[in-house]
Amino acid sequence: MIVSRKDAVTVVGYPLGGDTISVTKGVVSRIEVTSYAHGSSELLGIQIDAAINPEILKTLNTIASSSMNTDSVESSKKKAKLNSYVWNHFEKIGMKDGKEKCKCIDCGKVYSCQPAGGTSHLLRHTSKCPLIPKSMDAGILRARKLDQRAYRNALAKCIIMHDLPFSYAEFKGVWEVNKILNSEFKPVCRNTAKADCWNMYLIEKTKLKTKLANIPSRVCLTSDVWSSITTQGYMTVTAHFVDDNWKLNSKLLAFCELDSSHTGLELSGKVFEVLKDWGIDTKIFSLTLDNAASNDSMQNLLKERLELQNGLLCNGDFFHIRCCAHILNLIVQDGLKVASEALYKIRESVKYEKASEGRLKHFKRCIQEMYLDDTGSFLRLDMPIRWNATYMMLESAIKYRRAFTSLTYNDRNYKHCPSNEEWERAEKMCAFLAPFYQITNLISGSSYPTSNLYFMQVYTIEMKLNQNLNSEDEVIKDMVTRMKIKFDKYWSDYCVVLALGCVLDPRTKLKFLSFCYRRMYPHDYQEKVDRVKNVLYILFSGYIKNGTSNSIASHDMTHMTQSSPHGPMTMGGNGTSSLPSIYEEFEEEMSQETRNNDKSQLDTYLEAKIVGNDKDFDVLQYWKMNKYRFPDLAIMACDILSIPITTVASESTFSIGSRILNNRVELHSSVSGVFFNGFPVRNQVAAKLDKCRKLVQIAEKSLKEGTDFYYGVEACNEVLDGHGPEIGPTLVHECLCIRAALLLKVLQELHVSCE
């Protein structure tokens, strides 16, 4: 007879390791095949628990059975943990036809899921179900099916953003990496990559052309010409404008090859061709150029062509802007001539030390012997035609003055060490030029308005020169005298249109111009102020004549309708009233009242209180907030504040290190310039993040101080609407919370006012 588990048995035999017969009573706890202790055969064996009394066991079983019947919830078996991958796509739906069932979450098909049945049939379904993504199969990570078109677009974007050669698409190492990532990868050749880049350029160009056509403001231009080491000439044209979000944009429109002659006729023809191609030949406000003679001829010819089609305001009186950085370079270069010998020796000293690695190591030992600090910037070699590079060279070399002197005793080949007198002269010059260097960096920005900075910076330069004309130091006095002559040649009369940028900055207005002119020209300052004011009103009348306020209202309404995810908004009730149309009518009526008022928009603006000088103040955001209060003046402010006062934005296109320009540069540079519209580079992303954080701080400040709730809400809206997903979820969440709190405050104010 074969016993079963839990049977009560009596066992007679020899226990393991014993030599006497024993009798054991107990309960069978396990039955299994085991090796016979006294032989090599495998026999069926049982294990008994002799300590358990069978009667007690029956009693315990009775108690357990009773407990299960009285409390089925507590005594029911715990559900097994569902560890299989398939449960990401299946859910249990309970008992059906006496069997436990589960359902596919994606397609709804029902399967059996008995505990002892396994999940193989469910795994087979996940591999066949058309609605389940195939990136995962049976719990194993696998590459999804490769979209070759998407890969080629990503490759083109990578080549453009990182300035890679088209042959990058044929790099064997890149092929191997892509093959590991996806076995279906199919390599492309350089010609295919080039074609993809060009197609992507055309798509982005179309987007930018549409954007330029729809903005209500005008476009300001910068242009520059450069010759390569092979004497081949190139020209760039860069557009500067304020976009829908009232942000200043700089876009490279053209990087084109020139013929051998860089005459004004050829240059004007090239620029006009670019403007016609982009469809902005009737929307130009200004053109900023350096002081090359051919540029004077070019701007005259281009202005005549644009005037033929009524493409300029006020007959083009404000069309030509001279590059302030270039003028400042000419002014300082004249001043540096007083110390040409000292500059020559310092330049040769730096050049000598940077000529080889061995000399640099020797020089660093001299630095250590003199206990000088070698952290921070090391020796810099200048570019003689750029005074700011000369300033940086002086600043770095003066720091190691004693090391250069020590080097004369250790290196007999070093012949250009300046004398003590020449070092002192260089130190005085460096200290005097420090403010000029800061001004150059400030006015050379392209991501923020600079025309409102022009008047203040030129005024600072003139004051600095006047204060040192009678300096006791002969070196500084001689230097300033030379610089003042050059200053009077170019800036004796401040550029009036750029002075308007200062007037349209609500922190300064005409009062600041009057204050500065009074300090500089106490006898005839009012005449200069009246001249600027007269030009301001003439230009404003041109905008009134063109009716720019209608375009800004219609543009905003179109933008509101297109941006709404649910289409045009309607008011409550019967839903027949369209909110945009009512809002448009209301704004038009307010604008009409402003025009019919005795005071013009310009008069009202000039008489209004000056805004506080906050370091984070954004002048374009001020005009965005007041675009309905001053509709025509806001467009005029956009155009003037868009004027770049330097050509740095165009010159930077040529600042590409040691790269050699070849026949692919026109395609590659044009594509890169336009692609800044779609794919932000790293420093642009960082600038956006910094700007967003400042806007959030402004909103948070409004919430804490309990004032300007509407301004805080507008700041939050700009972060959320104007910068997209690149700002990150954390900042978005913070901004949403602050905006919600501000809106509650606004509702509370409205409730109190209604009561």
Image (spheres, helix red, strand yellow):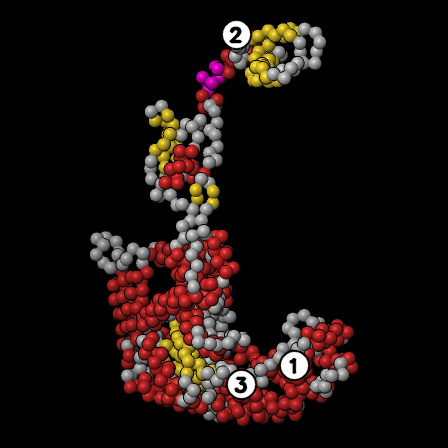
Residue 72: image x %, image y %?
A: 45, 21
How crowded pointer 2 is (Cα within 10 Å; few <14, some 14-19, many 20+) is rated as few
Q: Earlier in the sequence, mark 1 or mark 2?
A: 2
Q: Is residue 713 above or below residue 609?
A: above
Q: Earlier in the sequence, mark 3 or mark 1?
A: 3
Amino acid on which disc 3 is placed:
Asn
- For disc 2, the marked residue is 1
Q: What stretch of residues is rendered in magenta?
A: 65-71
Left or right of 714? Residue 480 is right
Q: Residue 329's mark?
A: 3
Q: Is residue 4 above or below residue 555?
A: above
Tell which tag, 1 or 2, sits nearer the viewer.
Answer: 2
- For disc 1, the marked residue is 351
- Residue 100 is a magenta residue: no
Q: Residue at x 39, y 85 (%)?
A: 267
Amino acid on which disc 1 is placed:
Lys
Q: Secondary structure at mark 1?
A: helix
Cα–Cα gap, marks 2 and 3 = 113 Å
Amino acid on which disc 2 is placed:
Met
Residue 287: image x %, image y %?
A: 40, 82
Cα–Cα gap, marks 1 and 2 = 107 Å
- Residue 68 is a magenta residue: yes
- For the residue pair 407 and 623, the one nearer the viewer reads as 407
